[in-house]
Image (tube, helix red, strand yellow):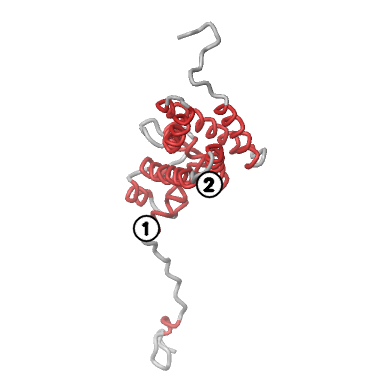
Amino acid sequence: MMGGVAIDGSNSSSDKPRRGRRVRMTGAERRQQLLDIGRTLFAEKGFEGTSVEEIAAKAGVSKPVVYEHFGGKEGLYAVVVDREMRQLLDGVTGALTAGHPRELLEQAAFALLDYIESYTDGFRILVRDSPVAQSTGTFASLISDIATQVEDILGLEFKARGFDPKLAPLYAQALVGMVALTGQWWLDVRRPKKAEVAAHLVNLAWHGLDGLESKPQLVGRRKN
């Protein structure tokens, strides 16, 4: 071999093993990767505690890549929250199939608890404080959206019992709020078991509805 050229005339440098080329992600794959990383960080540290620098570092990219896909941390957060909201709302809507009203309450309670159990990071994001400038995606708006799903069911039940169906939205907010806040507490304690939590929630809700007065009166001194 002379001057790097083998006797057979081939270039010896071409016989060396080449380094494996880094596989480039498609735009869709990179976007999904950033969403997954952002979701994990937002659940762990919250919106304020998460930086674009950290998201980019974990993805192995530069900050401009994050801005290119989402316009910044706020845009990434908004997409993550929107996906979690849709996941939970679809679960609740799909769970409300048919049957006795008490069974529908059980289905709604299980839908929320199932989501907390299977999408813990997502629920942590939803119950954290949202950016001040963001008007949607808050825990309150989540409760309101879910309550809308059960308003019609309560309205029919109220009408059948001779109550004013116009009050159904108020009671829907109260019931869903009770379940959602209990779910927020159960998120960390995980005791008792899911089915038992659902049973106790429905016990309180149903027996409260079962003895509902058509025109409740205040018993204390305050009247306004």
Res. 102 visible in picture: yes
**Residue found 43% across the figure and 38% down from its top:** 149
Task: Point out residue 98 in the picture as x, y percentages from the top left corner.
Answer: 50, 45
User: Which of the 4 quarters of the picture holds residue 210?
Assistant: top right
Q: Which mark is residue 28?
A: 1
Amino acid carrying mark 2 in the image = Tyr
Q: Secondary structure at mark 2?
A: loop
Say whether disc 2 or disc 1 marks the residue closer to the N-terminus.
1
Residues packed near mark 2 inside 10 Å, few (<14), some (14 to 19) or many (20 plus) = some
**Residue found 35% across the figure and 52% down from its top:** 65
Name the one closer to the observer, 168 or 59: 168
Give the quarter of the figure containing the N terminus: bottom left
Res. 44 visible in picture: no
Task: Point out residue 48 in the picture as x, y percentages from the top left corner.
Answer: 45, 35
Q: Which mark is residue 119?
A: 2
Give the quarter of the figure containing the C terminus: top left
Instruction: Establish if 110 lies above or below 178.
Output: below
Task: Point out residue 202 in the picture as x, y percentages from the top left corner.
Answer: 59, 34
Amino acid carrying mark 1 in the image = Ala
